C-alpha cells in the first residue's frame, strides 16, 4: 500500500470488523486521540491540514480511509455499509490501537457517523466534533421517501438509490467529477433554477451539463486534485454511494436508540456558505445535547477543512485545549 501524497504521514493498515482498513496517524500516543472521519467523495487525505496541525501541536490524531474508500476494503453487499458496520469499523480501529475512548470528528457523511457513536458505542466515545454536519433528530418518516417528496427523483441522494446509475455517471470522467464537486461556494450547484423557489440538489444533470474547462472557484491545486482523481479512478464510487443506499435501513434500525447526547463534550463547527449542510440545520441542537459549543466559519462552503484549514484547526485545537488539556 503506497502513500497517496507526501503531505500525509506513512499509511498503516489494520484488520478491523472483517475488513482491511488504511489509516494515517500523527502525534505522540498519549492523551485522548481524535479520529477524523471523511465524507463523500473524499478520503483520509481530506484531513491533511488537520493532521499536520495536530502533529505540530503534539496532539494524537488518526484519519482512516473508511469502508469503501481509498486503501480500505470495499465489500460488495450494500448492507455491509450500514451504520452498524461504519461505527463498528471505528470501534475496531480503537481496539487495534489499544485505545479505550476517542474524540470523533466528522465532516459530511463522516459527521453522520460520529454523531451516532455516543448513541451506539457510548463507552468508546470521549467527545464529538461535527464539521458542517449537525446532530439530526430521527426523521418521522423514511428519509428517502421524505427526500423524494421534497426534492424529486433527481435529488442526488434519491438518484444514488438506483443500482449502478450514479456509480457509472461519476466514474465516466473522474477528473471532471472531482473538479465539479471540489469547488468553492461561489460555484454552488444547489442553487434553484430560474422560476423555481427551492434547490433540487440534482447533481447528476448538473454534472453532465457542466463544462470542466471552467476553472473558476476550483478549490484544489493540480497536485491535490490528482490525489483524489488517482484514488477514485482506482476504486470507483460504488463503496461511497453504498453508504447512501443504507439511509432507509439505518432509519429502520435506529428506532430504539437514545435521542439525546449527555455526559460528553461536543463541538459543532458550521460553515456559513455550505449549500448542502447549512448552519440553519444546526438550530436546536442545544435541546438534545447537554454539553455543546458552536462556532461559525465565515466564507466557507462545503469543504470546510480544506477551504479554511487554519480556522478549523484553531477552533478544534482551542476546544481540545480547554476540554482535553494535555
Image (cartoon, rainbow, N blue to C red):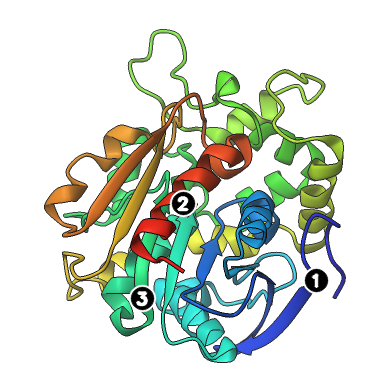
Q: Which quadrant holds residue 19?
A: bottom right
Residue drawn where x is 55% and y is 26% of the image: 189
As drawn, the label of residue 19 is none
Residue ID for mark 2: 316
Q: Secondary structure at mark 1?
A: loop
Residue drawn where x is 58% and y is 90% of the image: 96
Which circle's residue, 1 or 3, is located before the other in the chain? 1
Compared to residue 45, the image places residue 21 above or below, namely below
Label 2 environment density (alpha carbons within 10 Å; few <14, some 14–19, many ≥20): some
Identify which residue, 181 or 97, lies in the foreground: 97
Question: Mark 3 against mark 2, which lies toward the viewer?
Answer: 2
Tell me residue 242's x, y (percent).
54, 63
Q: CA gap, disc 1 to disc 3? A: 26 Å
Identify which residue, 51 or 217, lies in the foreground: 51
Q: CA gap, disc 2 to disc 1? A: 23 Å
Residue 221 visible at all: yes
Which circle's residue, 3 or 2, is located before the other in the chain? 3
Residue ID for mark 3: 125
Label 3 environment density (alpha carbons within 10 Å; few <14, some 14–19, many ≥20): some
Which circle's residue, 2 or 1, is located before the other in the chain? 1
Residue ID for mark 1: 10
Tell me residue 37's x, y (percent).
53, 62
Q: CA gap, disc 3 to disc 2? A: 17 Å
Give yes or no for contact between labels 3 and 2 (Cβ–Cβ under 8 Å): no
Residue drawn where x is 35% and y is 39% of the image: 295
Label 1 environment density (alpha carbons within 10 Å; few <14, some 14–19, many ≥20): some
Q: Secondary structure at mark 3?
A: strand
Q: Is residue 3 left or right of residue 78?
A: right
Quadrant for the N terminus in the image: bottom right
Tell me residue 17's x, y (percent).
54, 88
Compared to residue 94, the image places residue 264 above or below, namely above
Q: Is residue 304 left or right of residue 130?
A: right
Amino acid at each position: 500500500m503506497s502513500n497517496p501524497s507526501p503531505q500525509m504521514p506513512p499509511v498503516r493498515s489494520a484488520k478491523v470488523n472483517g475488513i482491511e482498513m488504511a489509516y494515517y496517524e500523527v502525534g505522540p500516543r498519549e492523551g485522548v486521540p481524535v479520529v477524523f472521519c471523511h465524507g463523500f467523495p473524499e478520503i483520509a487525505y481530506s484531513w491533511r491540514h488537520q493532521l499536520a496541525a495536530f502533529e505540530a501541536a503534539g496532539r494524537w490524531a488518526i484519519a482512516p480511509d473508511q469502508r469503501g474508500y481509498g486503501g480500505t476494503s470495499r465489500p460488495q453487499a450494500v448492507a455491509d455499509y450500514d451504520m452498524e458496520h461504519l461505527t463498528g469499523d471505528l470501534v475496531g480501529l480503537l481496539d487495534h490501537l489499544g485505545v479505550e475512548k476517542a474524540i470523533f470528528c466528522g465532516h459530511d457523511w463522516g459527521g453522520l457517523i460520529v454523531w451516532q457513536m455516543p448513541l451506539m458505542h457510548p463507552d468508546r466515545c470521549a467527545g464529538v466534533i461535527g464539521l458542517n454536519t449537525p446532530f439530526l433528530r430521527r426523521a418521522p418518516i423514511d428519509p428517502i421517501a421524505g427526500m423524494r417528496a421534497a426534492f424529486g427523483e433527481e435529488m442526488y441522494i434519491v438518484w444514488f438509490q438506483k443500482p449502478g446509475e450514479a456509480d457509472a455517471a461519476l466514474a465516466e470522467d473522474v477528473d471532471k467529477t472531482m473538479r465539479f464537486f471540489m469547488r468553492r461556494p461561489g460555484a454552488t450547484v444547489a442553487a434553484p433554477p430560474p422560476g423555481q423557489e427551492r434547490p433540487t440538489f440534482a447533481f447528476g444533470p448538473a454534472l453532465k451539463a457542466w463544462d470542466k474547462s471552467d476553472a473558476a472557484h476550483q478549490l484544489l491545486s493540480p497536485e491535490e486534485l490528482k490525489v483524489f482523481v488517482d484514488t477514485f479512478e482506482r476504486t470507483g464510487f460504488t463503496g461511497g454511494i453504498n453508504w447512501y443506499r443504507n439511509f432507509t435501513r439505518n432509519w429502520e434500525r435506529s428506532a430504539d436508540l437514545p435521542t439525546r447526547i449527555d455526559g460528553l463534550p461536543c463541538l459543532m463547527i458550521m460553515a456559513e456558505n455550505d449549500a448542502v449542510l447549512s448552519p440553519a440545520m444546526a438550530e436546536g441542537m442545544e435541546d438534545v445535547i447537554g454539553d455543546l459549543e458552536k462556532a461559525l466559519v465565515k466564507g466557507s462552503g462545503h469543504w470546510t477543512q480544506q477551504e479554511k484549514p487554519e480556522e478549523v484547526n484553531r477552533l478544534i485545537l482551542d476546544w481540545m485545549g480547554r476540554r482535553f488539556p494535555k
